[in-house]
Amino acid sequence: MDGLWFAIPVLAAAFLVRRAMPIPRSRRAISTWAFVSFIPYFLWQSLIGGLDVAWRSFHPRLPLEPNSYLYPLRLTSDSSRVFLAQVVSLMPGTLACRISRRNLIVHVLSGSRAALVTELTALENRTAAIFRETLEAGHE
């Protein structure tokens, strides 16, 4: 209760900022089952990624290989692409740097492009299921 003097204005400011942001909304109903089944997947991937980042940060040689990769998107709606970018940014060791209609630029702490494409393809497939979308043509 002692922190309410701080929490209430911060929550109000966050609400106002969120209302001002042009975040696209889906015109389709999302799949509740796909979203619920996504949660354990997301938690497991977050745990694995968090352990990997922790191991690398405490390793004496700091085995980091930061890089940025271009990932061609197959999702069709703005809502699903924004959701994917937000989830990528929440995963430990990755950050969605730029999103466009066709591509996502992702910064990683380590790993190859092939490994990133494998992980993002699985994540994109799950996102398509949540938003009930059919994915466009495959990766280049």
Image: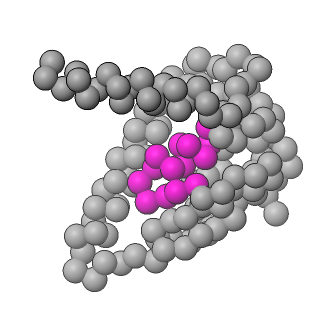
**Looking at the image, which is closer to me, 7 or 23?**
7
Residue 140 lies within the magenta run: no
Could you tell whether 115 is left or right of 57 in the image? right
Residue drawn at (65%, 50%) of the image: 121
> Given the current orientation, which residue lies at the most extreme bottom position?
61
How many numbered discs sit on the rendered protein?
0
Residue 41 in picture, x, y percent from top left:
47, 37
Could you tell whether 66 is left or right of 132 in the image? left
> Given the current orientation, which residue lies at the most extreme right position?
137
Residue 66 in picture, x, y percent from top left:
48, 74
Residue drawn at (61%, 30%) of the image: 20
Relative to residue 24, is residue 28 depicted above or below? above
Relative to residue 53, is residue 28 depicted above or below? above
**Looking at the image, which is closer to me, 12 or 120?**
12
Residue 67 in picture, x, y percent from top left:
55, 73
**Looking at the image, which is closer to me, 86 or 125?**
86
Q: Can residue 128 be seen in this view?
A: no
Magenta stretch: give its range: 83-96
What scheme was used to colour the molecule?
one colour
Q: To which quarter of the image does residue 27 belong?
A: top right
Residue drawn at (45%, 30%) of the image: 14
**Looking at the image, which is closer to me, 6 or 38?**
6
Residue 88 lies within the magenta run: yes
Q: To which quarter of the image does residue 119 belong?
A: bottom right
Quadrant for the N terminus in the image: top left
Could you tell whether 4 is left or right of 63 in the image? left
Q: Can residue 50 be seen in this view?
A: yes
Residue drawn at (58%, 55%) of the image: 96
> Given the current orientation, which residue lies at the most extreme left position?
2
Quadrant for the C terminus in the image: bottom right
Relative to residue 140, is residue 87 depicted above or below? above
Residue 93 in picture, x, y percent from top left:
43, 60
